[in-house]
Amino acid sequence: MSLRISDAVVWQETGEGISLYHTETGDFRTLNETGSKIWLLVANGGEAKPVASALSREFAGTNAALIKRIVVDVHAFIGTMLEQGLFEESPA
């Protein structure tokens, strides 16, 4: 499944990360640097596995334990974004 940003979300990059506003719920938040990287990868047509792989390469190199932790954390972040209606899944 492909991920995409919900049409109900207005967002922009700021000096502090990415600021999000969900127009249907009124929720506002700012993502930190790592969350912002995940957000941008999804915005550019990401899927969960390639997003996790890209961040693992960037931050973990060949450290297997760190790669595993990053993959788990990325999937948890994506799951939270899906639950909160910020990301949506669509057929590939």
Image: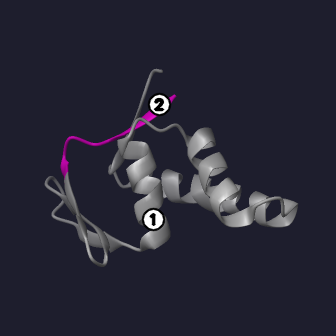
Residue 85 x/y as whole percent = 33, 49
Residue nearest the observer in this picture, 7 or 62: 62
Q: With 14 as the anchor, is 63 left or right in this view?
A: right
Q: Residue at x 49, y 67 (%)?
A: 34
Q: Amino acid at mark 2?
A: Ser
Residue 80 x/y as whole percent = 47, 57
Tag 1 secondary structure:
helix
Q: Residue at x 66, y 47 (%)?
A: 53
Q: Quadrant of residue 76?
A: bottom right
Residue nearest the observer in this picture, 76 or 49: 49
Report the residue marked by disc 1.
35
Relative vertical location of residue 7 with respect to residue 62 in this rendering, above or below? above
Residue 4 part of the magenta segment: yes
Neighbourhood count class around disc 2 (C-alpha, 10 Å): few under 14, some 14–19, many 20 upward = some
Q: Quadrant of residue 30?
A: bottom left
Q: Residue at x 15, y 64 (%)?
A: 26
Sequence-first tag of 2 and 1: 2
Q: With 2 as the anchor, is 28 left or right in this view?
A: left
Residue nearest the observer in this picture, 89 or 50: 50
Q: Amino acid at mark 1?
A: Gly
Report the residue marked by disc 2.
2
Magenta span: 1-9
